[in-house]
Each structure stands twice: as structure tokens, then as C-alpha cells.
Amino acid sequence: MNTLRIVGLGLLAVAAILIAVTIHVQRDHARKMQGLKILREMTPETLIANCGSPTSDTDALLGPHAGWALTRVMKYKTEKAPYWVNLEFRRERNEPWRLSHFSASTVGVSPSDDNAYIAIPVFPCMAKKAP
């Protein structure tokens, strides 16, 4: 009888561990997906609303080889690591601005990358909700 209780408690412990691991994996996946969504929907306006005015904000027109697209590079300086962050936005004709590249001293990613969510912890103000 005692053996049956020990086996039963052991199975319960294994089930609890599996549930805890599953919850952790699902939360981690949801956090990554939310980070990707934030980056893929980022516009210059939402960036300024969330993070304030950039240190530098420049526009450029890309020639016919790029389909006459506009680019906008916004640079932020920070007081602690990574010390600087560059966000490059691109706009095709009659299309909204889209983040095309994020770079900092520690990371550089494109929002189309599967691991682009790593940019959020580097520059967390991007993910906050503007008032």
C-alpha cells in the first residue's frame, strides 16, 4: 500500500513539473511573439510617442534601384548600455512607414528575423504603451 502511495505521489510530482515547464514555455513563446508584433508594427510616430524625441532624425530618398523608397533613420543615445540605438524605417510609395532595421552596440536585427524580439530588452521603451 505504501508503495502505491509513493508511486502516486511521484506521478503527481512529475505531472506538476511538466505543467510548470509547459506554462513557462508558453509564456516565453507569447513574450517573443508580442515582441515581434511590436517591432513589425512600429512606426516613427509610435516610437516618438513611446521613447521621446530622438537625438537624430534624418530622411533620405532612395533612387530607382530601390523603387524610390524613403528611409528615415532615428538615433537615440542612452546613459547606460547599449549607449546608442538606431532605428531605420522605410516607406514605399503610398505605404505606411515600416521598421526595416534595428541596431545597437549589442545587437542588430531586422523585424523579419525570427529572433528580432531580442531588440525589446535592449530598448524597452519601444514596448511601452504611449499615454
Image: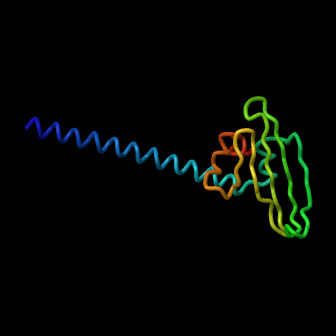
Q: Please indicate whether residue 27 sits to the left or right of residue 58 in the image.
A: left
Please state the horizontal and vertical placement of residue 45, each as a whole percent of the image.
81, 52
* Residue 94, image x, y percentages: 84, 69
The quadrant in which the C terminus is found is top right
> Where is 29 relative to 13, above or below?
below
Q: Residue furthest top?
A: 79
x then y, percent, for residue 41: 71, 57
Q: Position of residue 62 (x, y in %)?
A: 89, 63
Above or below, comparing residue 66 to residue 124 in the picture: below
Q: Identify the residue at the far left of this view.
A: 1
- Residue ID at (85%, 42%): 54
Q: Which residue is at a point 86% across and 57% down the rendered structure image? A: 71
Depth check, front residue: 121 or 9: 121
Total marks in image: 0
Above or below 83: residue 45: below
* 15 to 111, vertically: above or below: above
